[in-house]
């Protein structure tokens, strides 16, 4: 499995104010690039895309961001 250069068409820009994984970007370990892709497999090399961070610090950040989004907002009248 090697990079064929197809992934450069799907290269994702770094988001401002939030993390890459939180925005839905995925990383290919073979191509060494973050891409905006709906599937689980890299369109270029066929390798499985990483959808979550490996670093403990960034895992905690992602969990915190997801939990704040998932909580319903209370409206008091």
Image (spheres, rainbow, N blue to C red):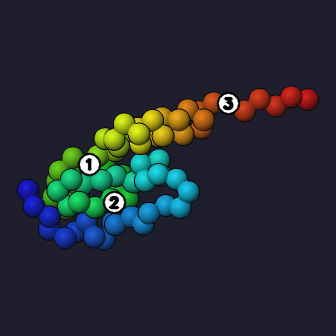
Q: Earlier in the sequence, mark 3 or mark 1?
A: 1
Q: Earlier in the sequence, mark 1 or mark 2?
A: 2
Circle 3 sits on which residue?
Answer: 72
Could you say where residue 8 lies in the image, as x and y percent from the top left?
28, 70
Identify the residue at the far front of this view.
Answer: 57
**What's the distance in space between the residues labelled 3 and 1, CA to CA?**
31 Å
**What's the distance in space between the residues labelled 2 and 3, CA to CA?**
30 Å
Position of residue 35 in the picture relative to residue 76 (left or right): left
**What's the distance in space between the residues labelled 1 and 2, CA to CA?**
9 Å
Position of residue 37 in the picture relative to residue 47 (left or right): right
The answer to whether mark 1 and mark 2 are in CB contact below 8 A is yes
Rendered-image quadrant of the C terminus? top right
Circle 1 sits on which residue?
Answer: 49
Residue at x-position 53% and y-position 35%: 64
Mark 3 lies on a secondary structure that is: loop
Could you say where residue 51 lies in the image, as x and y percent from the top left?
34, 44
Q: Earlier in the sequence, mark 2 or mark 3?
A: 2
Residue at x-position 33% and y-position 59%: 34
Q: Residues within 10 Å of mark 3 (few under 14, many from 20)?
A: few
Circle 2 sits on which residue?
Answer: 35
Count of numbered circles on the image: 3
Rendered-image quadrant of the N terminus? bottom left
Residue at x-position 36% and y-position 36%: 56
The answer to whether mark 3 and mark 1 are in CB contact below 8 A is no
């Amino acid at each position: 499995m090697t990079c064929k250069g197809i992934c450069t068409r799907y290269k994702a820009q770094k988001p401002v104010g939030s993390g890459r994984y939180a925005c839905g970007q995925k990383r290919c370990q073979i191509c060494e690039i973050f891409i905006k892709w709906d599937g689980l497999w890299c369109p270029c090399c066929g390798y499985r895309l990483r959808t979550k961070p490996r670093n403990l610090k960034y895992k905690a950040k992602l969990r915190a961001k997801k939990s704040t989004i998932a909580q319903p907002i209370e409206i008091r009248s």
